[in-house]
Image (tube, rainbow, N blue to C red):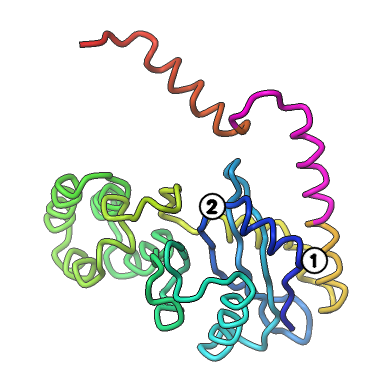
Amino acid sequence: MYVCCAELKKAWKEGCRPVLGLDGCFLKTVCGGQLLSAVGRDGNNSIFPVTMTVVESESYDSWKWFLMLLGDDLDLHSGYAQTFISDQQKFKELFPHAEHRNCTRHIYSNLQGKHASEAVRNAFFEASTVTHPQAFKSAMKDLEMASKKAFYKMSQLEPNVWSKAYFETHCKTDSTENNISECFNSWILISRYMPIIDMLTEIHDMIMERLYEKRDAMKLVYFIVLPKIKRILDDCVKENAECSVL
C-alpha cells in the first residue's frame, strides 16, 4: 500500500529543500511487514514527511517499487539536483544524476563490529565532518594509523557519499546522518503497533495536526528568517562579537 497525499507532495515541491531521507522500520503487529518512508527537510530544518508505503519486507523489489512511484509523484526524473540520504544506495539506477549520501551512523555501526576503538571512531567522524579535501586526507591518515583494515575498508567507499568535504551544495544541508528518517520513525512508534489501515489513518492525522500547529506558530513570527535558522545566526553573532577584524 502506497500513500502520497496531494498537499504534502505539493508542499515538498514548493517549500522544502531538495533532500529526502529514505528508511524502513518494522511494524509491530502479528502480521509483520515494514513501513518505508521518504522524509524531507523544510526551511526550518524540521522533518517533513512526504510519502510512505507498507510492504512485506525491506527487499530490493519493494524499494524499487516504492521509489518508482515516488519518482513519478515528485517529478524526480533522473534525480538531477536532488539529494537522497539512506543507510545504503538503493536507488542509483533509478536516479543516476542525484547525489547519494550514506548515513554515517550506519557506516560506523558496520565498521565498529570488526574495528572497534576510540581512535578509529574519532578518525572516522573527523573524516566525515571536515569540510575541505585536505582535512579529509589528514583524517584518513589518522584512521590508517589507528587501523589499517578500517582504513582499507573506508577507502573502498567513495568519499562523496559520506564526507562533507565532497558533498554537493545544491540541497543546502550538510547532514551526514539520516536523522530526519530516524526522527519520523520514532515519532510514529506507537502507531506501528496498530493494524495497517488504523496505522495509516493515525499517521495521516498526526501529520495534519503537525502542519496545523506549525502554520499557527508561524503566524507569530515577524522576521523573514525562519526561527531555527535565526537562532543559528544569533549564536554566530554572539560567538563572533569579540573578534577583531584584520
Q: Residue at x 50, y 29 (%)?
A: 232
Range drawn in magenta: 208-225
Position of the C terminus by quadrant = top left
Is 232 or 219 nearer to us in this picture? 219
Q: Residue at x 78, y 63 (%)?
A: 190
Q: Mark 2 and 1 residues: CB-CB less than 8 Å, in contact?
A: no
Disc sitting over residue 17 in the figure: 2
Q: Secondary structure at mark 1?
A: helix
Q: Amino acid at mark 2?
A: Arg
Q: Secondary structure at mark 2?
A: strand
The crowding category of the residue bearing disc 1, from other C-alpha atoms within 10 Å (few below 14, some 14 to 19, many at least 20), is: many
Residue 87 % position (x, y): 45, 69
Residue that mark 1 sits on: 191
Residue 53 % position (x, y): 69, 78
Q: Amino acid at mark 1?
A: Ser
Q: Quadrant of residue 50?
A: bottom right
Is 38 or 144 nearer to us in this picture? 38
Residue 117 % position (x, y): 28, 56
Q: Quadrant of residue 156?
A: bottom left
The crowding category of the residue bearing disc 2, from other C-alpha atoms within 10 Å (few below 14, some 14 to 19, many at least 20), is: many
Q: Residue at x 72, y 71 (%)?
A: 4
Instruction: Indicate whether residue 97 is drawn in magenta.
Output: no
- Tell me the distance, in whole angstroms, between the alpha carbons under discs 2 and 1: 27 Å
Main SS of residues in magenta: helix
Q: Residue at x 59, y 73 (%)?
A: 24
Q: Closer to the N terminus: mark 2 or mark 1?
A: 2
Q: Nearer the viewer, mark 2 or mark 1?
A: 2
Residue 160 % position (x, y): 29, 61
